[in-house]
Image (cartoon, helix red, strand yellow):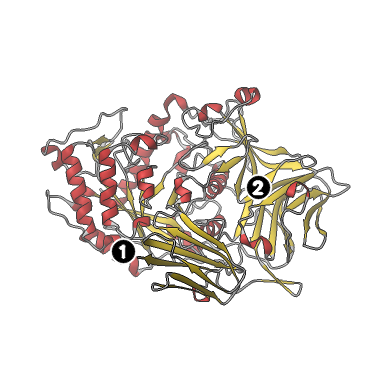
Amino acid sequence: MNNTEMKQLFLILITLFALTTYGDENPNVILPEGTYPYWPTYSYIEDKYVTNIRAQEWKTTDHVIEGWDWSMPGFIKPAARSSVGLQRNFGWTKDFFNFNLKFQANPTGLLWVNWREIEKTPGVYDFSGILNRIKQAQSVGVKISLRILGHSKSRGTGSGEAPLWLEDLGVTFLPQKNPGDNLNFNPAHPEFHKRYLMLINELAKTEIPQLVRNAYVGYASSSLGDEGIGPYGEGNSAANDTVKHVHERLDAWQIAFKGMETKVFMGGSCDYGFSKGFGVRRGFVEMYLYNIPNRDLGQYIDNKGYLSVEETSPIIKYKCFNGEVNEEYEAAWATSGRDFRFGNTTNPFPYRYFISTLRALQMQCTYVHTTGHLLPQMLPFLALELGRSVEDAPDVWAFLNTSYLRTSNYKNNDWKNRQFTATEQSEGIETKNFERWLYQRDATGYETKPEEKIQQAIKMWMVQPDKYYDYIARSGKKIGFDIDDRWVRIHDSIAFKVTYFDKYAGSLNLVYNNGQEQVQKSQTLTGDGQLKTVTFFISQLKANSLPNKFDFALEAGSNTEKIVVSMVRVVQAKVTDGTVGINQKPFFQQSAIRIKYHTAYKLISINSQNEIRQINVYNILGRKVKSVLCPGIAYDLKANGFKSGVYFVHVQDKYGNFKREKISIV
């Protein structure tokens, strides 16, 4: 079977999985198609043409443009933890191409291989095909994410990934729940389990763990590719944590990636894996309202209806690999051959790509495999946003959307003990905003309403019946915002990018305090109904200085009926002598910060060319054990109270430069 045939089979099987998984709960009934005037018409970009994509231009003076603004200053570099998947090869016979990107990113190639091809004869292992392909990828500047598939005898009507000789050893099969499911060997069978552990032990003896950017560990799945992490499905991760053979599988991966545990990511959530530093990759973000709430993702709706992130959830607290897949945008997904899974035409696809990309970033993902690139300028934005924490984010933002979710979503995943009003029970939960360390909140005098309805293409099961639509803006006379106090750039020069609907003539005003007085900057509104983004540069912002401790507000002018705002971004910038310019210094200028551990004195010395802002120390599990705010250029941190072990020292200066150093304390 060639690569094209394998890809076609993959798409057929993933469709079968979707149809059998959702069943009556997600009938995928097509809705009357709406209009999508704020996004370009459907145009699918193949992987090899990603080289033509460029970042949106960053302008250095106050200005207004038509449409969305995804621009970033040129000095911002991708986060070290980030990666964006841009090419996938099945098997090791096809070369990876050189991305030659025209924008800043940490691009990754996905290599999917079968256990069946590695161990054709019991006990005889051949990893040369994988090694050759990894080295070929390296020769063209591509880092590899490895996925070894190995649980199915047959995949739908095609061949599977596991060695067929397992059946000769008496390994039994898992029951097939639906026609078209994979016929999987039982991972709990003693012989399968022994042979699987032997495979991973042999992997550990190769160069592969050192050479790959990351590697995937999954479990038997009814669909293409090993998915999940144990016999219990997503949403029941606590049950997988009780399974002995699941622990032993993860132990084997830890041994194979000793000292590199953060490279490993699982097909499902498992606290045992998180405790080792492993991450997780899911694959639902195209259904952008799915997994709300979700304890493992830290996703919940607070009592005021705002979609919130619980940063003590393991995937965020341990700074694990946090991955998503934003794919399934080929035109075939709008055909009868795939049951019109996402609508009866491709017209809604650019909107779905847009909001799914923002959802992945709202979840604080470190990795996204993305295809189609239906909004090309969003890809460079995504690449710079992935892998951030509030400590190193170059911007904060809020997308002021509203959707209506069923209360039944909380049935099996209500770790917050959410109480519902009678209105929510009958009309659904009004779920507001995708926020990333910028929070819009209503208050007295700052009331808002959802506006600009966008029709969903299908009846998603998590949405309240008869409310199959989203709002993509909020309107009011005054809209108040609070920047997360942990964002260190709140005290630096910043740019406000406000995307609004120009529906009412008058003015839109940015109101803030510069440390001496309240200031107002204005943008004229013509009432032409167009979507626009205005950019305001300011040199200083005094936090929590407006009513309700808001950091800033957007207000309608005195003769303006109201303003309609869709998205607000606050971006790191620089202002010198009243002229806006770009800080040309690299965002991660490693040489500017020096960290040295003095073993004899148990002292961590930190020196910087610039003023230090934040020092954090994390243990090997990613738990923060020390945090210091330091306004000077040098600091000596005593480590005599630390237990013996490996620690990571994170230092950030006032310009956002970042340094990470690994130390061992004995």
**Three-letter code for the amino acid on which mark 2 is drawn:** Tyr
In the rendered structure, the answer to whether residue 130 lies left or right of residue 66 reads left
**Residue at 27% over, 61% down:** 208
Q: Residue at horizontal 56%, vertical 41%?
A: 348
Are the residues flagged by discs 2 and 1 in contact, CB closer than 8 Å?
no
Q: Nearer the viewer, residue 607 or 397?
A: 607
Q: Nearer the viewer, residue 107 or 633?
A: 633
Does residue 452 sit above or below 212 in this rendering?
above
Local crowd size for mark 2, using a 10 Å CA cut-off: few (<14), some (14–19), many (≥20): many
At which x and y percent is residue 483? 66, 53
Q: Mark number for residue 211?
A: 1
Q: CA distance from mark 2 to mark 1?
A: 41 Å
Q: Can you say which quadrant of the picture contains the C terminus?
A: bottom left
Q: Is residue 241 above or below residue 573?
A: above
Q: Earlier in the sequence, mark 2 or mark 1?
A: 1
- Where is residue 225? Give x, y as percent: 32, 43
Q: Is residue 46 left or right of residue 392?
A: left
In this rendered view, identify the residue nearer to me: 192 or 50.
Answer: 192
Comparing 268 with 102, the one in front is 268
* Vertical order, 383 against 331 (above or below): below
Label 2 residue SS = strand
Residue 439 - label: 2
Q: Indicate the position of residue 272 as horizontal and vertical percent values.
A: 35, 44
Regarding residue 138, the answer to whether it shows in the image is: yes
Image coordinates of residue 373 in percent, x first then y, are 51, 53
Q: Which amino acid lies under the numbered mark 1 shown in the image of this protein?
A: Leu
